[in-house]
Image (tube, coloured by chain):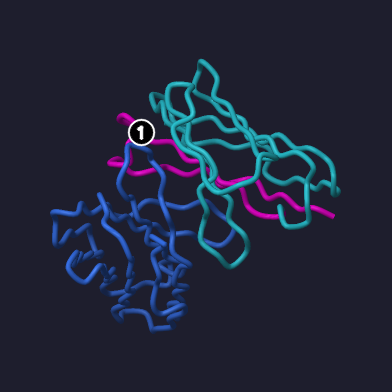
Amino acid sequence: SQQGEEDPQALSIQEGENATMNCSYKTSINNLQWYRQNSGRGLVHLILIRSNEREKHSGRLRVTLDTSKKSSSLLITASRAADTASYFCAIHGSGNTGKLIFGQGTTLQVKP
Amino acid sequence: DAGVTQSPTHLIKTRGQQVTLRCSPISGHKSVSWYQQVLGQGPQFIFQYYEKEERGRGNFPDRFSARQFPNYSSELNVNALLLGDSALYLCASSGGYGGGNQPQHFGDGTRLSIL
């Protein structure tokens, strides 16, 4: 299976702390994407990292990709209560479809 | 600019019925994908359409079908509904050539409940 597997399943931190979420996968990828989902809403795209990239930043977000270990991590620095959400990694594998394979997600709670 | 819009937002059906869900992509986007998200799980890919042609299909039974119209909007149809079809159905659009190298933009979904 190409499914991304995320760790931890749930994470609870205080505002201002950093949050790290990990994603592992089993096959070759074209890119890996991270999405956020607030309760009952659609997914919001955060970062896309290509297979030949190792690190990308966007504001308080930092994503790393290690293709040799088939793993990625999402770091949220200086977390805020508004960061409370579920975070999903999604694998785009080979082929010319736009199919994404999502992991089960990490539920992040940031306490004020 | 308007994002991806889906209708209806909520729907209640009974087993055996049929349902049609609708999606309007972001203006200029030619690729539309459908995902099913069961409570507590990540979204699962159902279909992708690009330029009105089916580009990809996930592991779903033939009860699930979709199409894309000349204005790039899309419909997802599900026949002979089962209790297990209860889920949030998400539509996503993307720019480029729909090959997966562009981020996908999701609507807020249609919450389908089967009684």
In which quadrant of the rendered image does the C terminus of chain B lie? bottom right
Whether residue B88 is situated above or below residue B65 in the rendered picture: below
The amino acid beneath tag 1 is Gly
In which quadrant of the rendered image does the N terminus of chain B lie? top left
The residues colored magenta run: B86-115
Q: Residues within 10 Å of mark 1 (few under 14, many from 20)?
A: many
Q: Which residue occupies 69% across, 38% down?
A: B8
Which hue is chain B drawn in? cyan
Please say whether residue B88 is one of the residues in the magenta stretch: yes
Q: Which residue occupies 32% across, 50% down?
A: A93
Q: Quadrant of residue A69?
A: bottom left
> Image check: B53 left or right of B112?
left
Q: Which residue is mark 1?
A: B98
Coordinates of residue B98 in the picture (x, y in percent): 35, 33
Q: Which residue occupies 62% across, 30% down?
A: B75
Chain of the residue displaying label 1 = B
